[in-house]
Image: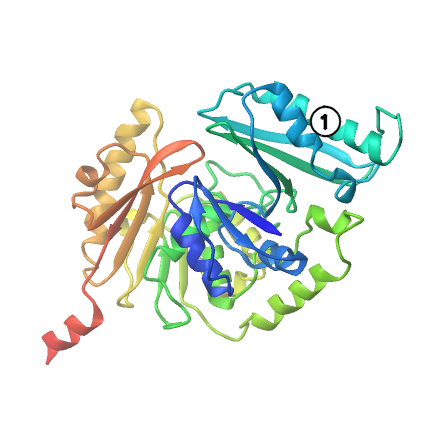
Amino acid sequence: MKLLIPVASGLEQITKRQLFALGYAKAPADNGRIELDGDWQDIARLNVLLRSGERVLIVLSRFHAVTFDELYDGVYDIPWENWLTVDSKILMDGKSVQSTLAAIKATGGVAKKAIIRRLSDKIRSGRKTFAETGARSIVGISVYKDEVTVTLDTSGEGLHKRGYRSLAYTAPLKETLAAALIDSTFYNPDRDIEKPFADPFCGSGTLPIEAAMKALHIAPGLHRDFDFTAWAYAPKGILETAREEARDKEMRTVTPMIFASDINPEAISIAKYHAKRAGVDKHIRFSVADATKFSCEQKYGVLLSNPPYGERLSEEKEVRALMSAFGKAFRKLPDWNAYILTSLPDFERAFGKTADKKKKLFNANLTCGFYSYFGKPPKADDEKRR
């Protein structure tokens, strides 16, 4: 089968590296989606093991369409009787970019009519309505430059929903984005488990929890369900096989050095609860602390944070002052690397230092900058001492 992995803009290369580590060498990216060949077991593996992809989709068809008649015919030609049952709960999802068929709601309606007609003709002769009381099947209709891609969503809920984050807190970072940000840093616990990782604005704990899961090789989708397991035509047992593989990869005996702090005691309480649900609470050192006073005795650490944004003007002034003080604290750690995700305009000026590298990303539909600051490498320090 052809599989598609939707990926947030700017994270394609990170996700491709994750796929390569899982054994998928051929996975070209195009228009925010990564394509690869796979079978049912690959579908289960990707849903359980992939850290930064948003979903795992099966490509059912691709065709050109500029009219609703062409769309209807193209969707009808798909052998839906091989994928859906008479009681399938069919939900439509879609998007259109630079295409004649721009009305998404109408496009989804036409596509669903074609699906029902096909099922009626092939499974229940003459019947035009179905109860839709069975397993959920999310059909995607993506139209890009008049080329239609029809997919079936094997994941159901987005892969960012790991299952450990249940309490609400302000402006949470999606787990898939957090995992990608971590993979964008020099934090590599497989190479150096003692390298410290810190998030002084940890909020509900997503970044340190994802860092701990990476260090312990805990699969992100290990404890959740996926839509494909309820489909009649999906092979039985493939999810448990993927879970067994995930458990075999775990390294529960390692002791990563992960620090998580926030000035708000409620945030720390929520973060601890989430870490416990994720099974990593014993591997994260939580504290209530002011980020502008952050310091650490350990050297060559990685600081990764998503500080408050300040969307209103009055808040923006406060955030600028906060980032100024935080920048002064960070400059007292010359051998640390820092990575900051923020939508604050002119962040570098507020922080007091020009970034060594910066990239545009999106968080909760906000355009953000991802700023990287590189500290002195260990070799340079060692040579200086000699």
Please provide percent x and percent y for residue 91.
Answer: 69, 32
Please provide percent x and percent y for residue 171.
Answer: 46, 36
Residue at image location 47% in from the left, 36% down from the top: 170
Give above or below for 345 relative to 263: above
Q: Let me know if residue 207 appears in the view.
A: no
Q: Mark 1 points at which residue?
A: 114
Please provide percent x and percent y for residue 194.
Answer: 37, 72
Residue at image location 65% in from the left, 56% down from the top: 223
**Coloring applied to the structure:** rainbow
Name the image quarter holding residue 129: top right
Residue at image location 34% in from the left, 30% down from the top: 310
CA neighbours of label 1 inside 10 A, class few (<14), some (14 to 19), many (20+): many
Q: Which of 36 and 285 is in front in this view?
A: 36
- Name which residue type carries label 1: Ala
Give above or below for 245 relative to 202: below
Q: Let me know if residue 95 appears in the view.
A: yes
Left or right: 383, with 135 as reference point: left
Left or right: 124, with 287 as reference point: right
Left or right: 265, with 228 as reference point: left
Locate the C terminus by quadrant: bottom left
Residue at image location 48% in from the left, 40% down from the top: 172
Q: Nearer the viewer, residue 95 or 252?
A: 95
Q: How many labels does the image show?
A: 1
Q: Which of 352 and 26 is in front in this view?
A: 26
Q: Residue furthest bottom?
A: 386
Q: Could you say whether the residue bearing mark 1 is in a helix, strand or loop? A: helix
Please provide percent x and percent y for residue 69.
Answer: 64, 20
